[in-house]
Image: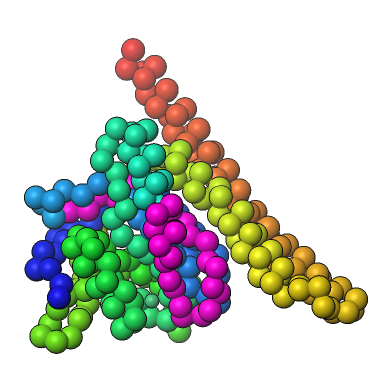
Amino acid sequence: MLSEIYLKRVNMTADVYAVCVQHALTTEKQEIMGLLIGEVDENERTSNISACVILHRSDKQPDRVEISPEQLCTASMHADQLANKLNRPMRVLGWYHSHPHITVWPSHVDIRTQAMYQTMDPLFVGLVFSVFQNNARSRENQIQVTCFQAVQEHSEVERREIELVIQPSSFENYNLEGIANLPKILIQEEVECHDVQDNGTQDELSALHNDAFKTLALVHIVCKISRPLCDDLEQRKRTINQRVKELENLKKNLN
Ligand SMILES: [Zn+2]
């Protein structure tokens, strides 16, 4: 049975939103997932999300996302470290996952998973990022996000939408580290996936073929993720430098 206590609102910093979207855009074949960290205002029933943990997928099944107890534990430890560093009560507040090529609405499995987390923490929240949805008219890659909790409706568990507010923020170092680690996590997943197939029983030709595929997958990560990520960060740096110059000029004029 679910608790009657629900969240009213979720505030998320723009840099965490950027990390989640970048993460969701890394693959259109499988769903990706991660955990959200921040502070919760129990009186206001508001969650303030200011950091996240990108999770490594051990199981690359399409339409299946599962967070292992070990991953939850690692994320809690990460939240504790942040709490110590920032001297703020940071903890794991929710989870996010992607829906590539499908609608943003959480599936029945998602709502059941969400309900399970809420039995442990009534204010736990779920976010879904729908990516690679082509709009027939504009042909653009649409990104949609929804924020939800599970609610008990008679004998059924249903979705309840929670207000989500993206708040302006600068890129915090710990979120920058998260995004910088993304290619590393993806490479680790690729290497593990290929090492499982390579069990020493392959003939030379198969080994060569599989190695070529592994190389292709790694090149794909560099081309499609690392390079654009570097370009994006360079662009941010240029924008910030420009802003610094503008503010310095303004200061000079004020003097
Ligand atoms: Zn889902």
The x, y position of residue 29, in whole percent, is 55, 77
Q: Position of residue 124 (x, y in %)?
A: 24, 61
Residue at x 35% of width, y 55% of height: 36
> For residue 9: magenta?
no
- Report if residue 47 lies within the magenta region: yes
Q: Residue furthest bottom?
A: 155
Q: Is residue 216 above or below residue 183?
A: below
Residue at coordinates 84% horizontally, 74% vertically from top-left?
Answer: 207
Measuring 45% from the left and 29% from the top, which residue is drawn there?
Answer: 244
Instruction: Looking at the picture, tell me which residue is in the foreground, 180 or 204.
Output: 204
The span picked out in magenta is 46-74
| Quarter holding residue 18 | bottom left
At 51% from the left edge and 80% from the top edge, which residue is drawn? Answer: 62
Above or below, 248 against 116 in this view is above
Determine whether 96 is above or below 160 in the image.
above
Asked where in the image residue 194 lies, by quadrant, the reply is bottom right
- Residue 97 visible? The answer is yes
